[in-house]
């Protein structure tokens, strides 16, 4: 880029890229959405239940 944000070949003024202007076009990631967190909690509760069930079942069948 030339002086003052001009194109070196045609001398047109080019817009500043968002990174150079100090802003970003994409929002910064704020973390996982609430429904994904709810899914993780549900899967965790289910897996704890299944492990508990397996621990109870295993001695009866060995």
Image (cartoon, grey):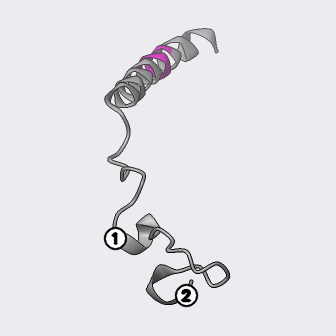
- Image height of 42 relative to 61, above or below: below
What SS does tag 1 mark? loop
Alpha carbon of mark 1 to alpha carbon of mark 2: how far? 19 Å
Instruction: Locate residue 31 relative to residue 6 in the image: left or right.
Output: left
Taking depth in this image into account, of 43 and 53 the one nearest to the observer is 43
| Residue displayed at 34% across by 70% down | 22
Taking depth in this image into account, of 41 and 10 the one nearest to the observer is 10
- Image height of 27 relative to 13, above or below: above
Majority secondary structure in the magenta region: helix
In the rendered structure, does residue 38 fall within the stretch colored magenta? no
| Residue displayed at 34% across by 25% down | 38
Q: Which residue is mark 2?
A: 2
The image shows residue 48 at horizontal and vertical percentages of: 42, 24
Residue 33 position by quadrant: top left
Q: Which residue is mark 1?
A: 22
The image shows residue 15 at horizontal and vertical percentages of: 46, 68
Instruction: Locate residue 10 relative to residue 43 in the image: left or right.
Output: right
| Residue displayed at 59% across by 79% down | 7
Instruction: Locate residue 11 relative to residue 55 in the image: left or right.
Output: right
The image shows residue 26 at horizontal and vertical percentages of: 42, 51
**What is the span of residues highlighted in magenta in the rendered image?**
49-53
Taking depth in this image into account, of 58 and 22 the one nearest to the observer is 22
Quarter in which the N terminus is drawn? bottom right
Dot 1: few (<14), some (14–19), or many (≥20) neighbours within 10 Å?
few
| Residue displayed at 43% across by 18% down | 46
In the rendered structure, does residue 51 fall within the stretch colored magenta? yes
Number of callouts: 2
What SS does tag 2 mark? loop
Quarter in which the C terminus is drawn? top right
- Image height of 28 relative to 6, above or below: above
């Amino acid at each position: 880029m030339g002086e003052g944000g001009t194109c070196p070949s045609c001398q047109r003024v080019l817009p500043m890229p968002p990174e150079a202007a100090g802003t970003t076009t994409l929002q910064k990631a704020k973390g996982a959405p609430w429904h994904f967190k709810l899914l993780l909690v549900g899967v965790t509760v289910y897996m704890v239940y299944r492990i508990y069930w397996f621990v109870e079942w295993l001695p009866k069948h060995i």
